[in-house]
Amino acid sequence: MSAASQVAAVPSAGQPSLKTFKRIVIKVGSSLLVDRGQGGVKRAWLESLGQDIADLHRQGADVLVVSSGAIALGRTVLGLPERELKLEDSQAAAAIGQIALARIWAEVLADRKLTAGQILVTLGDTEERQRYLNARATIGRLLDLRAVPVINENDTVATNEIRYGDNDRLAARVATMASADLLILLSDVQGLYTAPPAENPTAELIPVVSRVDAAIEAMAGGAASRHSRGGMRTKIEAAKIATAGGTHMIITDGRVEHPVSRLNEGAPCTWFLTGSNPVTARKKWIAGSLEPRGALHVDAGAAQAIANGKSLLPAGVTRVEGSFTSGDCVLIRDFRATEIGRGLVAYDASDAVLIAGRNSQDISGLLGTPGRAVIIHRDDMVLARDRIAAWEPDADGKS
């Protein structure tokens, strides 16, 4: 399909309003946040972004921040050179800078009566199902408590072989992990252009991309800033991850004050649209992309509760089959052994056997440590009827 058929040149009035989104991830890059000349953060700019976050929060949206800046702040404190750092120097700079970065975000959000929660993740936390579920549960609980998670890659321990290396793709993974419906990448460009604007003065901004294909990928240039590890290529990769997970994405210029609220005023940007939503995309993944490792048999009451959209509690489990670990996909069978659904289990098989049929309040005593109240959360579950629907052809004929 040609690039022209993938790009919808619609006016900003035809784009979605931020008010329609319920869970928003905002990615902030080092070059926007850190004033390298002054050796600290761009405080006035950050205050304006903090106000944008508070406005979204006040409208009822959940807001998450993926923030770079730890290494940039730390290298200034340590007096490390401007050239590319050795791995051990980057890790040391991150250890110093992460403290400052967390404190700054906490102060800015607290000034607006918001609570910040720090989460440091590595590649494995978003790629390995058990760690993925743990990180997802922590994010979900913080959002339930109306806190603002501030997330960064754990550069103090990540090596070159096991790291993202850019926060664009990390932000996309976080957005899908958190079931966000919008990801905003604040950048040092206004959006995706038909060609790199620094090289081609006639390049035009693309307002809407309905689907990322090879032609769209070919439009991406290199990194725009020497302080940033990302570039347009990583943003296109982020768009592919986000839209596949049911999350819309925006690239917009973050160098101005109030960069998020300006979007509602028609600020230049590029929207990457998805035809799905986070719940549908996640259930489709569970329904057909994962091989079941076992089964949980449930009683009639639990089967009815699941049909009504409830999570599966240990009390409703009558039998455990298979050898599985936390995060694996397992089948859910009723008293007739009929598959009524499947989902990502929160316990290893050996622990599931111990808590089966027992009240959630007994878990700590049975396992010797506090555990999750549910054995499969409703967000990690797809019912048999939904599984069939998930693999019906889409409008374009693809499943």
Image: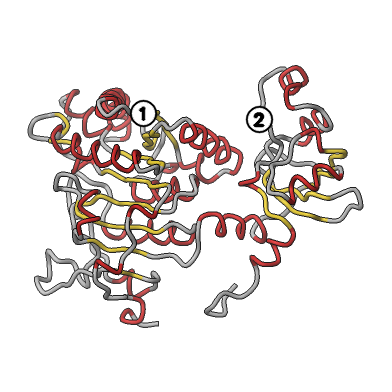
Q: Nearer the viewer, residue 83 or 267?
A: 267
**What residue does disc 2 label?**
372
- What quarter of the picture does the C terminus occupy? bottom right
233 sits left or right of 277 in the view = left
Q: Quadrant of residue 326?
A: top right
Rendered position, 16 above or below 253: below
Q: Quadrant of residue 232?
A: bottom left
**Judging from the image, what secondary structure is the residue with disc 2 in?**
loop
Q: Which mark is residue 391?
A: none
Q: Amino acid at mark 1?
A: Ala
Q: Position of residue 18 (x, y in %)?
A: 33, 54
Q: Residues within 10 Å of mark 1 (few under 14, many from 20)?
A: many
Marks 2 and 1, the one that precedes in the sequence: 1
**What residue does disc 1 label?**
116
Q: Position of residue 392 (x, y in %)?
A: 65, 72
Residue drawn at x 64%, y 65% is 390
**Judging from the image, what secondary structure is the residue with disc 1 in?**
strand
Rendered position, 221 above or below 96: below
